[in-house]
Image: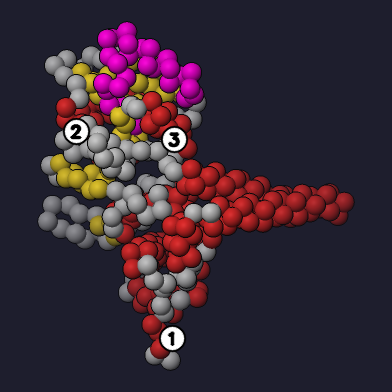
Amino acid sequence: MSTKSYGCIQHSIINFNRKGMKDLSTFQHFVGCDVSKDTLDFAIHQRGRDSRTFEHIRVQNSPDGFRAMRKWLRSFKIAVRDAVIAMEHTGSYSAALAEWCFKKGVTFVLLHPLDVKNYGARGRNKTDKDDSQFIADYAYTMREKLEPSEPESPVIKRLRQLRNERQMAVRSRTAYINLSKALPDEANKKRVGKIIVMLEAQVRLVEAEIKKVVESDEAVCRNYRLLVTIPGIGLVNAITAIVATGNFTRFQTARQYAKFCCVSPLARQSGTSVNQGDHVSKAGHNEIKATLTEGARSAIRHDRQLRAYYERKRAQGKSHGCVLNAVKFKLICRMFAVVTRQAPYVDTDKYLS
């Protein structure tokens, strides 16, 4: 992933550079897309037109909807291949449109949601229709900074699907465990217990399939094996990082990925004073942050360096949340370090014992 600057705003653009793609600054038409699970809102930004008035359409988030969007553009004498489709990167919700664009030879850009949000943090309405126009205007304004994107590889896409499947099974298992604790009679507990055993078996099956897919791709397998050498990083965190980073091709540095995850502590600042302490951003990808949280807790228990760091910062008066966030950032740095060096993690403390 490349990081671009525009004014005082840093832009972390999720992309895969595709050689031979046109310079986006040469395009006349920029189509913003606000993505949701079931629907897509499209709006057109055309050079020379009043940005306060725009054309809009809402379609289903499906191949039929994509074709309806293309037909809609034709009504304005715009061929879809002559336009740039800009959308926020929303994981599985934006994946189908991105893949359709790629197959049809349509230029598209996946945007970091926080970049779009920060760019228009003041004075704009918050509806899907308005968001689509704002994204179109944003893409037009940033056209010289943005780069075309490509969809996920089949292996990364499959790993994302399996990770989500495992997550659903784990959540169901947790719900049934909690239900079992609340049941008063043994007969119902036994029945629920059988469901829990079934879900545990399903989790194991999915994990086995994940490992099979990992082993089918040499580059993914190599990075996976490096990642799990880090204390606190197991199968779930390793796969989550591989999926989110496109096997460490979307982000050039650990800090860029940390910004994407929103795990770096933020300083509250007013004027020239910084006196309100650090706080933890509540933005970012919740699932990535949740898995990193579990990894950080495990690392604090099993890694002497991080445990000592955590205890030192807590003794200095830092909150648990801020220190845990800093540990997450350290884990991200370790992940990028082992992948960049293509060497397993080494615990240097063990040589001091």
Inspect the image, locate mark 2, and give the three-letter code of the amino acid beneath it: Asp
Q: Specify which label sits upstream in the sequence, 1 or 3.
A: 3
Residue 226, by quadrant, is: bottom left
Q: Is residue 270 left or right of residue 322?
A: left
Which secondary structure lies at badge 2?
A: loop
| Disc ID at residue 315 | none
Residue 111, by quadrant, is: top left
- In the image, which is nearer the foreground, mark 1 or mark 2? 2
Q: Which residue does the image show at 43% across and 86% down from the upper left?
A: 350
Q: Specify which label sits upstream in the sequence, 3 or 2.
A: 2
Which secondary structure lies at badge 3?
A: helix
Residue 187, horizontal then vertical, whole percent: 87, 51
Relative to 60, does residue 265 appear above or below in the rendering?
below
Label 1 to label 3, Cα distance in Å? 44 Å
The quarter in which the C terminus is drawn is bottom left
Q: Find the magenta span and give its range.
A: 61-87
Residue 262, horizontal then vertical, whole percent: 35, 52
Q: Which residue does the image show at 40% across and 84% down from the upper left?
A: 349
Label 3 to label 2, Cα distance in Å? 23 Å
Residue where numbered disc 3 is placed: 95
Inspect the image, locate mark 3, and give the three-letter code of the amino acid beneath it: Ala
Q: Which residue does the image show at 53% across and 45% down from the upper left?
A: 158
Residue 5, horizontal then vertical, whole percent: 16, 45
* Residue sitting nearer the eye, 37 or 96: 96
Residue 115, by quadrant, is: top left
Residue where numbered disc 1 is placed: 350
* Residue sitting nearer the eye, 108 or 13: 108
Residue where numbered disc 2 is placed: 23
* Residue sitting nearer the eye, 225 or 307: 225
